[in-house]
Image (tube, rainbow, N blue to C red):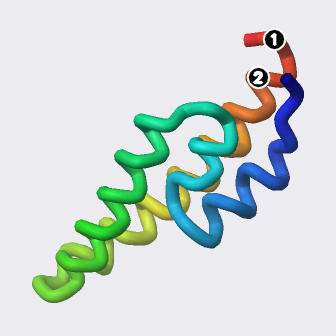
Amino acid sequence: MQKNPGLAAVLSFFIAGLGQIYNGQIGKGIGLMVAEILSWLLCAVVVGFVLLPVVWIYAIYDAYKTAEKINQGG
């Protein structure tokens, strides 16, 4: 089934992991959601300010690339 890479990226833009769930990667999506929540909590001890953007950007990039891969039959 074809996936829209743009939609997958936008979903992960708003909630990390939502694009992965859209792509059918439920476990990865939930894992990224947990990582985002932990990153927010770690902002209290500063490390979250570094970790949060990393998790967020990875989720967007991975959702887009995975949707493209699905569309190419991989």
In the image, residue 14 sits, relative to residue 16, either above or below, namely below
Q: Amino acid at mark 1?
A: Gly
Q: Which quadrant: the C terminus?
A: top right
**What element does badge 2 sit on?**
helix
Residue that badge 2 annotates: 70
Q: Is residue 9 left or right of residue 4?
A: left
Residue that badge 1 annotates: 73
**What element does badge 1 sit on?**
loop
* Marks 2,1: beta carbons within 8 A: yes
- The residue lying at 85 percent from left, 17 percent from top is 72
Q: Which quadrant: the N terminus?
A: top right
Q: Position of residue 70 (x, y in %)?
A: 76, 22
Q: Dot 1: within a 10 Å radius of its alpha carbon, few (fewer than 14), some, or many (20 or more) residues?
A: few
- The residue lying at 41 percent from left, 51 percent from top is 32
Q: Position of residue 22 (x, y in %)?
A: 67, 44
Q: Amino acid at mark 2?
A: Ile
Q: Position of residue 38 (x, y in %)?
A: 24, 67
